[in-house]
Image (cartoon, helix red, strand yellow):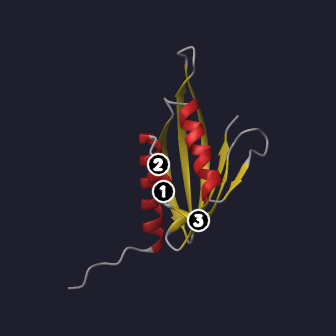
């Protein structure tokens, strides 16, 4: 009996879950190991369009700065599913501000894959 080959969709969903596990560990290297060299990340800030970061170097710098400024950052996956070369994830992002006040927002990320890695991560937030 031959092993069952994981579908491209299942592989994408697992990659997104791994990416977010690395996010919650604040493991920038682990996150970036799952992204292509020519990756693109669109942040939610500033509204309404956010900021676009292109290339592994720029995206890596963004995440390193982000975790330095948000040491309590945490993502809770509410739902994740795949379709073709894309994956959609609903999430709740939580933090603690410098005064110790907890906060959260909810949103959606749309991921696109290339050669089994995350090529594009587009983030959208409620509110």
Instruction: Name the front one of labels 2 and 3.
Output: 3
Quadrant of res 4: bottom left
Q: Up-down: is 20 above or below 7?
A: above
Cα distance in 3D space between marks 1 and 2 = 6 Å
Residue 20 marker: 2
Residue 121 marker: none
The quarter of the image holding the C terminus is top right
Q: Secondary structure at mark 1?
A: helix
Q: Up-down: is 114 above or below 106?
A: below
Residue extending furthest bottom?
1
Determine contact: label 1, label 2, CB under 8 Å. yes
Residue that appears at 58% across and 50% down: 60
Find residue 110 and report its horizontal and vertical position in percent.
61, 56
The quarter of the image holding the N terminus is bottom left
Find residue 118 and report its horizontal and vertical position in percent.
55, 63
In the image, taking residue 50 as reference, residue 57 lies left or right, namely left
Q: Which residue carries the number 1 mark?
A: 16
Determine contact: label 2, label 3, CB under 8 Å. no
Instruction: Name the front one of labels 3 and 1.
Output: 3
Which tag, 2 or 3, sits closer to the chain's start? 2
Find residue 55 and report its horizontal and vertical position in percent.
65, 60
- Dot 1 alpha-carbon crowd within 10 angstroms: few under 14, some 14 to 19, many 20 or more: many
Instruction: Say how many tags the image has.
Output: 3
Q: Secondary structure at mark 3?
A: strand
Residue that appears at 53% across and 28% down: 95
Residue extending furthest top?
99
**Camera-side residue: 5 or 72?**
72
Q: Which residue carries the number 3 mark?
A: 37
């Amino acid at each position: 009996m031959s092993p069952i080959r994981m579908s491209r969709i299942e592989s994408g969903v697992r990659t997104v879950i791994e990416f977010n596990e690395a996010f919650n560990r604040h493991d920038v290297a682990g996150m970036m190991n799952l992204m292509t060299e020519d990756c693109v990340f669109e942040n939610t800030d500033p509204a309404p369009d956010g900021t676009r970061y292109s290339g592994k170097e720029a995206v890596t710098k963004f995440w390193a700065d982000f975790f330095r400024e948000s040491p309590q950052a945490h993502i809770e996956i509410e739902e994740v599913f795949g379709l073709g070369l894309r994956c959609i994830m609903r999430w709740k992002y939580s933090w603690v501000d410098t005064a110790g006040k907890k906060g959260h927002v909810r949103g959606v990320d749309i991921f696109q894959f290339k050669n089994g890695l995350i090529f594009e991560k587009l983030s959208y937030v409620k509110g």
